[in-house]
Image: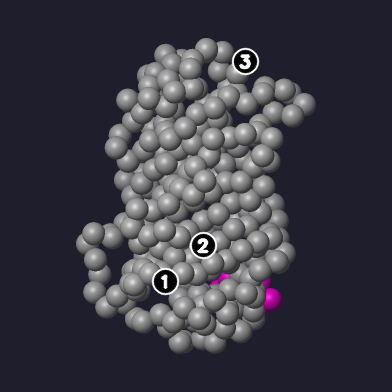
């Protein structure tokens, strides 16, 4: 049995999220259908992190087991031939299939990075519809950066956790938050050990409240300590959220893209 790992990129706007559903219409359903058409057998995939409807991935990582013997470039080109334009396999590799130490896309991840792209302009842009969250009120980046500092480290992030979240614990370690502006675009990049359901969108919504002057940076510290979801800002739209990077132990030697970027903004 061989364990194959894929790097998958997708535009989440046409899809109902990553995870398979009985009615279909998800990235996982579409990828597995393409794998079956290429391999002529059913193949079940495991991903690094499930994304919601409308959320994009610059580099989702998935693995599956198969007895088929194919060249790695064949898994890329062959599967892509059966995928729609909004989904593409970017790379493929094989990892050692040792029951004592097998690669696992989800449990083997050491950190995850998300980008949230904000379009900050008085008028919406049809070219960025579905690709960025729109905020028409002016945002000040420096207060947002000051507020974000309160979230670094290991905390109980219940204040930013969706009610339907199934994570066993709300305690996560936020390793880094970067907020960069390029003209009318602001990108919030967050790296953590793992994320709760809607955690990034809830944090971004609260950072926006600080950026538009309705709250001071210290408000985020109060929200975090209160552990009460109802006190934080509403969940922000999914349009600008991108699963950007999954980090793993270098021993697996995955051919990940060093900086899978967005063509209109280099975060």
State the predominant SS element of the stretch in magenta: helix
Specify which label sits upstream in the sequence, 1 or 2: 1
Closer to the observer: label 3 or label 1? 1
Kindly report the distance in space between the C-alpha atoms of the residues bearing marks 3 and 1. 47 Å
* Residue at the right extreme, as displayed: 100
Position in image of residue 143 (x %, y %): 52, 82
Q: Quadrant of residue 264?
A: bottom left
The stretch of residues the image draws in magenta is 225-230
Position in image of residue 259 (x %, y %): 49, 49
Q: Which residue is mark 2?
A: 189
Specify which label sits upstream in the sequence, 3 or 1: 3
Crowding at mark 3 (Cα within 10 Å: few <14, some 14-19, many 20+): few
Q: Which residue is mark 1?
A: 181
**Residue in the image at 67% along x and 47% along y:** 110
| Placement of the C terminus among the 4 image quadrants | bottom left
**Residue in the image at 68% along x and 59% along y:** 172
Contact between marks 1 and 2 (CB within 8 A): the answer is: no
């Amino acid at each position: 049995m061989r364990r194959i790992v894929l790097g998958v990129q997708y535009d989440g706007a046409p899809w109902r999220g990553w995870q398979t559903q009985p009615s279909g219409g998800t990235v996982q359903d579409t990828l597995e259908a393409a794998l079956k058409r290429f391999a002529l057998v059913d193949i079940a995939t495991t991903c690094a992190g499930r994304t919601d409807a409308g959320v994009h991935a610059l580099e989702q990582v998935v693995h599956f087991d198969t007895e088929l013997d194919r060249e790695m470039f064949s898994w890329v080109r062959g599967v892509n031939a059966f995928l729609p334009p909004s989904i593409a396999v970017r790379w493929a590799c094989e990892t050692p299939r040792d029951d004592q130490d097998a690669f696992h896309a989800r449990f083997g991840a050491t950190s995850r990075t998300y980008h949230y792209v904000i379009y900050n302009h008085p008028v919406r842009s049809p070219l960025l519809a579905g690709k960025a969250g729109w905020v028409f009120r002016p945002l000040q980046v420096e207060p947002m950066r000051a507020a974000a500092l309160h979230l670094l480290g290991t905390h109980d992030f219940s204040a930013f956790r969706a009610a339907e979240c199934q994570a066993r614990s709300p305690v996560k370690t936020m390793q880094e938050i970067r907020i960069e502006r390029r003209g009318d675009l602001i990108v919030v990049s967050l790296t953590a050990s793992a994320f709760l359901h809607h955690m990034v969108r809830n944090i971004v919504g609260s950072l926006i409240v600080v950026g538009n002057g309705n709250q001071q940076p210290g408000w985020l510290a109060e929200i975090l300590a209160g552990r009460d979801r109802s006190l934080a800002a509403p969940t922000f739209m999914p349009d600008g959220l991108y699963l950007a990077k999954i980090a793993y132990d270098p021993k697996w030697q995955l051919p990940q893209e060093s900086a899978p970027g967005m063509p209109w903004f280099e975060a």
